[in-house]
Amino acid sequence: MSRFWSDLVHTLTPYVPGEQPRIADLVKLNTNECPYGPSEAVLKAIAAETNDSLRLYPDPQGLALKAAAARLHGLKPEQVFVGNGSDEVLAHVFAALLKHEAPLLTPDISYSFYPVYAKLYDIATREVPLAEDYSLRVDDLLAAGPNGGIIFANPNAPTGIAMPLAEIERLLQANRDSVVVVDEAYVDFGAESAATLVDRYPQLLVVCTLSKSRALAGLRVGYALGQAELIEALTRVKDSFNSYPLDRLALAGGVAALDDQAGFERMRDLIIATRERLSTELSRRGAQVLPSKANFVFARFPGQDAAALAAGLREHRVLVRHFRKPERIASFLRISIGTDAQIDTLLQALDALLPGTPS
């Protein structure tokens, strides 16, 4: 069938998502999903929309969702763009704001969808290496030369390391002539959000998702925060691609999730406590664990082959994520934070696989 493909398709290497197994009773710690379900307020809001109104198109602007995001972040609705998950939002960001003559700057280790989008939209990129401790340094970004934009995840993926807000502001102060995109998919688990800087920096765009800390990965709701000029560019691209990216159920569930701050905080605190416990237990077993502000940890066991260890865990019915590329992180495993019971199962499996583990 490849003879019918466009030239572009032949050049693409698509993003590979984490495994979504069809085997029952696996402990699934490989895709950074929330281990707890959505709040009752969210479920009620979705149920209330399952009626005759589904025959009608949803609000193409998602005004109620924009208003809820604006309330949460202390911004105006016109400073919010909404889309079908943060991946769709990011796709529009690449098309609308990051395609210029100068190269786009990205970390050499970050969300692996960034190079896919860059290839799809024919955007030249320049990778900025992370430091030896796997942190992203502002000075390295600034030393990379002229750019057509900068994008990075904060906390970073898959390392989990966060850049302090003061450093993000220092980058914005020194890089005023191109857009700086801060992808905050994991920010709710202990990092500082750059949303507080939106009013002061017209070149800043913050991308958010309800998939992680709001337990709505299955609903696909994402949004971006920025000044009106950036939001208008995203809207022009969206309306040239899909005028109705969010259905009625997603809009209703998204509004309820953003408004249920108490439910969010309870779930977030549980995940953070389990993350800290897991980090401690992995360290006791000899692992190097990077300091995470996300809903996962990134760890390696010196002397152990990470791919073999991931395969061994799968035999014990525990899924984790291993990245073969880039080679610099091939010795690490990314482990999503599950329930305490799931983490107990993981640790038991590790104890069975690793020599000399503590009792």
Image: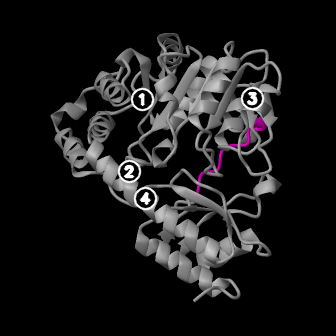
Mark 4 or 3, which is nearer the eye?
4
Cα–Cα span, label 4 and label 3: 32 Å
* Disc 2 target residue: 215
Along the line of sight, the residue nearer the viewer: 298 or 308? 298
Q: Residue 130 colored magenta?
A: no
Return the disc, 1 or 2, that comes first in the chain's sequence.
2
Mark drawn on residue 271: 4
- Residue projecting furthest to the front: 166
Marks 4 and 2 close (CB-CB < 8 Å): no
Residue count near mark 3 (Cα–Cα under 10 Å), binned few <14, some 14–19, many ≥20: many
Return the disc, 2 or 3, that comes first in the chain's sequence.
3
Q: Residue 16 colored magenta?
A: yes
Q: Position of residue 284 (x, y in %)?
A: 62, 76
Mark 4 or 1, which is nearer the eye?
4
Callout 3: SS: strand
In the image: residue 200, left or right of residue 283: left
Return the disc, 4 or 1, that comes first in the chain's sequence.
1
In the image: residue 233, left or right of residue 355: left
Q: Position of residue 118 (x, y in %)?
A: 71, 30
* Disc 1 target residue: 245
Callout 1: SS: loop
Per the picture, the main secondary structure of the magenta-coloured stretch is loop
Q: Position of residue 87 (x, y in %)?
A: 54, 37
* Disc 3 target residue: 105
Callout 4: SS: helix
What's the residue at 72%, 32% (across, down)? 138
Cα–Cα span, label 3 and label 1: 28 Å
Mark 1 or 2, which is nearer the eye?
2
